[in-house]
Image (cartoon, rainbow, N blue to C red):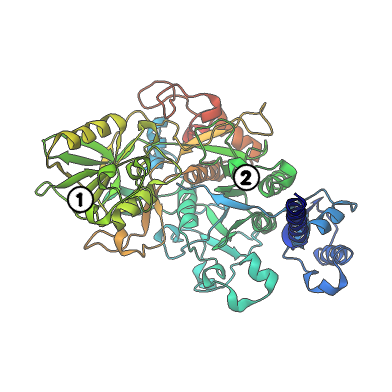
Amino acid sequence: MASLLHHLFSLSLLIIISSTASNQLPQHYVVYMGSSSSGEAPGIAESDHLQLLSSIIPSHESERISLIHHYSHAFKGFSAMLTENEASALAGHDGIVSIFQDPILQLHTTRSWDFLEAASGMQYKHKHPPMSSDVIIGMIDTGIWPESPSFNDDGIGEIPSRWKGVCMEGYDFKKSNCNRKLIGARYYGSIQRTYSNNKTHMAKPDDSPRDFDGHGTHTTSIAAGAKVANVSYHNLAGGTARGGSPSSRIAIYKACTLDGCSGSTILKAIDDAIKDGVDIISISIGMSSLFQSDYLNDPIAIGSFHAQQMDIMVVCSGGNDGPDLNSIVNSAPWIFTVAASNIDRDFQSSVLLGNGKTFQGSAISFSNLNRSRYYPLAFGEDVAAKFTPISESRNCYPGSLDTQKVAGKIVVCTDNDLNIPRQIKKLVVEDARAKGLILVSEDEKIIPFDSGTFPFAEVENLSGLQIIKYINDTKNPTATILPARDVPRYRPAPTVAYFSSRGPGQYTENILKPDIMAPGVTILAAMIPEKEAGSVPLGNKPSGYAIKSGTSMACPHVTGAAAFIKSFHHRWSTSMIKSALMTTATIYDNTGKPLQNSSHHFANPHEVGVGEINPHKALNPG
C-alpha cells in the first residue's frame, strides 16, 4: 500500500512539474492596446512596446525582447513570444486591453454573377461601372497568382494618388507583377522563422506574395477579376469569367503561410490595409466554431472594429460548420457576415448499372470510363481487409479495403461517418487500384467536389440503396461511371448550402447573423495552374481556373457587390452600402417560392440573414 501511494505521489509530482514547465515555454501572444493616438509616431510606440517587454522578460533571455508584429496605424499593440506567467504579468499593466495566444485560423473553402443578374431581372450591360474605378479592395488571404488573365489591367487608368501601399518583392514575385489593377502586395512570412530569425529555414512559398494554395487567387478573382472570355474548367462551366467589380483595384495581403493563417498576422494585415488606403477588406478566413473567442480576443473582430471606425467595410465568410445552430463565426456586429448558397447550375455524372438502370450522381469528375465497357461492382464491406469492422469498410476508412479484392472494380461506399472527408475516401479507393468510386450520401449533404480524372459519382441514399440491392441480388454486378456534365437552369436556386454555418452568433444572440447570403457552391474562378497529373484530363493543358465551394467563395461575392455599388456612389458610406445590399436582398428562389435550406424546408434568418444579395437592385434601393 505504501509503495502504491509512493508511485501515485511521484506520478502526481511529475504531472505538476510537466505542467509548470509547459507554462514556461514561450508561446506567441497578441497584446492589444486599443486605438492609436493621432499624434503618436510609430517609432516611439515601438520603443515603448520593447521597453514594456524588457520589464517582464528576464535579462538572460534578452533575445526574446523583440516584436514579431507591431500594430501602430489604426490601433496599438504588438505580438511577441511570452510565457504564460509573463503574459499574466503584462495583462496587469496600464493600457493593456487584452492579451491572448495567437490563434491559427481556417480558410473557409470546401456563372454566379450572371445568375445574380438574372434573379434581379436586370442585365449587366444596362449598368456599366466606370472602366477605371478608384475603389480599392484589400484581400487578406493566401496570396495571388499575378499572371492570371483575371488580373490584367487593360483599360484601367493610373493608380489613384491616395494609394499609400507597396508591391513587395519576394520569391518568384517582382514589382513588375503588380500593375494598375493589382496595385499592392504584401507578405508577412512564417511566425516561427521571424522568432528564430533564421532565414535559411524559411519555406520559399512563404517568402512572397505569390499564392501557394490557390485560395487567394480564387477569392480575389470572384471579387474583382477582369472580364475573360471563353473560360471553363476542362469544358465544364464554360463562359465569360468576371468578378463582381471588374473595374476595381486590388491589394493583396498574404496572411497565410504553409504553417496556417495566424491571427496575429491577419491583424497586422488589417492594420496595413487601413494605412494603405483600401476601401473594402475581404477576409475568407475565420476561427473554428468550436473554439471561438470573445471579441477582445478575436483578431478579426479587433481589426475590423477599427477598420469600421475609419469607414472601411470588412466582409467576412461565416464558416463551413453548418448546419448546426450557433456555428457562425466572424459574427461581431460590425462585420458584414456572409452565408453561402447554390446557383442555378449543377454538375452531374451518370452511374450506369449492368441491369440497364441509370442513376444521376453529383460530381466534378473527368472519368475516362464510357458506355462501351462495364467493370465489376462491389460494396465496401464485400472487399474489406481482414479483421476490419463492417462500419469502417462500408465507409472506406483508410486501411479498411483489401487491395487485391478492390483492384479493377468500381467500389460503392457510404458517407455515414463525416470524420473521414469524401476526398480521403476517394484517395483510399484510388490507392487500392479501384476503377472508380460511387459514394452514397444524404441528399442535402451532396456538394460536387473535384475528383480529377478518377471516376467518381456521389448519389443520394435512395439511389444508393438500389445500387447496393443490385450488388446483393446479382452474381456478377457491373457498372460504369460517365464523365461529369453541366446541368443548366437548375432549380430551386438559390438554396442555403448544407455546409454554410448557421446563426445566431455565440456572443450576440440578439443580433441577426449571418447578415446576408451569396453564391458559394461550385464557383468557377481563377486558380494557380494545376500541378498534379491526376487532376488534368488526358490531352488537356493545366487549367488556370477551377471550381470550388465554401463561404470563402460567398464572401468575395458580397465584397465585389459592395465595390460595384461604391463605383457608382463614391460618397456613400460603408453603412449606406451595407444598408442598400440588405434592404434589396431577395427572399425568393428561381421558382418564385421562399428561399429553402438544404433540407428543403423554408429557410430562417439564422440561415440566410436578410436573403440573397441583389447587387443591381442595390444601386437604387429607394
Residue at the left extreme, as displayed:
372
Q: Which mark is residue 345?
A: none
- Residue 535 point in image, percent of width and height: 31, 58
Q: Position of residue 418 (x, y in %)?
A: 44, 41
Work out whether residue 555 or residue 598 is closer to the camera in this orientation and state it: 598
> Outermost residue toward the front?
1
Residue 71 shows in the view: no
User: Residue 409 — which label?
Assistant: 1
Q: Give me the C-alpha separation between circle 1 and circle 2.
A: 50 Å
In screen coordinates, is 188 left or right of 465?
right
Image point 51% across, 72% down: which residue? 173
Q: Which residue bears the numbered disc 2?
A: 314
| Secondary element at tag 2 | strand
Query: Which circle's residue, 1 or 2, is located before the other in the chain?
Result: 2
**Viewed as shown, does residue 496 lie left or right of 232?**
right
Residue occupying the point 30% across, 52% down: 429
As displayed, is residue 524 above or below residue 331? below
For this rendering, which residue is in front, 539 or 231?
Answer: 539
Hey, what amino acid is under mark 2?
Val
Name the foreground residue: 431 vs 276: 431
Element type at marker 1? loop
Q: Residues within 10 Å of mark 1 (few under 14, many from 20)?
A: many
Whole-percent x and y of residue 184? 58, 63
